[in-house]
Image: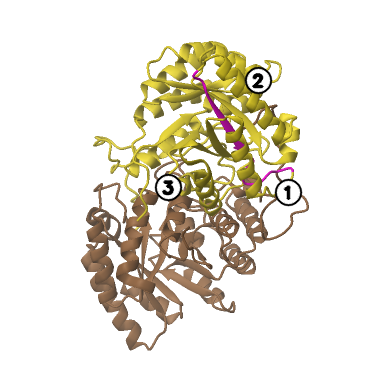
Chain colours: A brown, B yellow
Amino acid sequence: MPSFPTKVVIREVGLRDGLQSIQTTLPTARKIEWIRDAYDAGQREIEVGSFVPARLLPQLADTAELLDFAKTLPGLFVSVLVPNLKGAERAIDAHADLLLVPLSASHAHSLANLRKTPDEVIAEVARIRAARDAAGSTTLIEGGIGTAFGCTLQGAVDQREVLRCMQALLDAGADRVSIADTVGYANPAAVRELFDKARALAGERFWCGHFHDTRGLALANVYAALDTGVARFDATLAGIGGCPHAPGASGNASSEDLAFMLADMGIDTGIDIERLLALRAKVAQWLDGENLHGTLSLAGLPRTFPARTLAASPDVAPLHSAVNA
Amino acid sequence: MPSFPTKVVIREVGLRDGLQSIQTTLPTARKIEWIRDAYDAGQREIEVGSFVPARLLPQLADTAELLDFAKTLPGLFVSVLVPNLKGAERAIDAHADLLLVPLSASHAHSLANLRKTPDEVIAEVARIRAARDAAGSTTLIEGGIGTAFGCTLQGAVDQREVLRCMQALLDAGADRVSIADTVGYANPAAVRELFDKARALAGERFWCGHFHDTRGLALANVYAALDTGVARFDATLAGIGGCPHAPGASGNASSEDLAFMLADMGIDTGIDIERLLALRAKVAQWLDGENLHGTLSLAGLPRTFPARTLAASPDVAPLHSAVNA
């Protein structure tokens, strides 16, 4: 039997990866309510937005305000995505706990999405590190390596290139590195292989796994990653986001389904799932008409769920036939 | 790194577990087309129906005819579910390759669904074995242990009771035993633990895993089971079936998503996924209005899919934002 981590952090990225991918623009007051409710449900790491030009992502134009609010919640570890030094300076000034710099291991995807080569992103991370140190800031720098399992533009992505980028990010001064399956091309065997190598390379600085559920494998991929000792995963409430260009396809790993899987496995996430489901119901109303995901909100918690004795489970007996194997 | 099986069989149970759970009654001609197309797509094990009284499951009243047709396809291993000796005699007379007798490890579920205690089912298996041997038949007898991870009626199900039933089924003459998560209560850690013990108890006679996707964990559970060396899984095309009393919840492991996961992991299933997706599209038309599942039919195969070079992938580049981690 494997030994899984006893504690796992679910980093909520719905306010960034989720909201950037959908039509609805949530008012700032509702995003603040989301952050507060997520905090009350026990979430302790939240990516509140991106410091990118508002013309590119108007849905995330209020990131600075959200960061200021989130920093008022005791013990909340607040992160923000930044594409470059300019965004990083805003994150550092605002005392973000962590800034995430995305890098695409696929050169084609990197040029198309970030308008830089991977090595140009790595050079930018070195400048960000210098700026962070010059400011005497404690903001951590995370290099997030996307399209790590393949890419819709160039197809295959060489594992060696992912690991080369990871080493180069660390050499450039990243405090943390992580791996993302940006387009939903990972499978659990590939995850285990790459995450084993990443852990061997970066040790405890290998920080987080980010899986999209495009082909239904997000939770299987998390499970495979757990086996390598990784103990932090990105997820979005109601699974929003992911790959908006594959209509109807599933989005991100959903926070509530992931929280359930981990808790049911006996892994501590600190999350009160019923509170998280209540927040999901609220956000689902706010995002009426958007494509939401996840199954727990439909099926409910099992009667056997270990966290509590459920007096009235939403499950009912499957008395639908004489023979139900 | 673990060593997975190099070959895995996906047993198609959509015609039984799927169709028994939905409103639409498919005409026999369409079921025959389904079986033929599944065979042409490379599926070599199909559960064609149940030998239960037609008044209980009118959707499956044509099981004998389907079995006769399926037996004409060279190399197809044809199985059927039977609740009792009477059904088993029909399966033996019709030369089914395998008959599956369901047993509920949950006593409450057993009484409610099968109207027998587990030990009464085991006694029936002994009678079925005697009848099989008396007939000089080669039909294999599988004891399928359901509600193995918990039950909506009684809650927790003791692992020891699952393993006791498994040993008793083997002692009573079952050639094969399998485990089913009838109500979607399994998680991958629980699967790995129970399947390890089941393999230790039954060896190669531990035959098959059956996972419902009620809480989105079917594929993660299959992956966990692979780690124990189990190499046969039930699944249904479009994920039909599962738990019809949890409206909107996901049903079974979907055959096409499972075939993709396994193939992408480099595991041989013998299935041509594009043909299986074409069959899915056809069945989806036949089952218009029913609740279908699965993600591959929406997202398409990745460009990196190993079985072939895809000239035109249904995937498109996620050029939706300047920063897409």
Name the foreground residue: B308 vs B160.
Answer: B160
Secondary structure beneath dot 3 equals loop
Percent position of residue A239, x then y: 51, 52
CA–CA distance between discs 1 and 3? 34 Å
Q: Nearer the viewer, mark 2 or mark 3?
A: 2
Percent position of residue A104, x then y: 29, 59
Picture layout, residue A233 above or below residue A284: below
Secondary structure beneath dot 2 equals helix
What is the number of the mark on residue B85? 2
Q: Nearer the viewer, mark 1 or mark 3?
A: 1
Picture layout, residue B117 above or below residue A257: above
Name the chain letter of the residue that bears numbered label 2. Answer: B
| Image-quadrant location for residue A268 | bottom right
Name the foreground residue: B135 vs A202.
Answer: B135
Name the chain letter of the residue that bears numbered label 1. Answer: A
Count of all numbered marks drawn on residues in the image: 3
What is the number of the mark on residue A244? 3
Residues behind callouts 1 and 3 on a single chain: yes
Q: Residues within 10 Å of mark 1 (few under 14, many from 20)?
A: some
Viewport quadrant of the C terminus of chain B: bottom left
Secondary structure beneath dot 1 equals loop
Residue at position x 42%, y 81% from top? A93
Residue at mark 1: A313
Q: Give the extent of the magenta segment.
A: B138-153
Percent position of residue A225, x then y: 42, 58
Residues behind callouts 2 and 1 on a single chain: no
Name the chain letter of the residue that bears numbered label 3. Answer: A
Of callouts 1 and 3, which one flags the residue occurring earlier in the amino acid sequence? Answer: 3
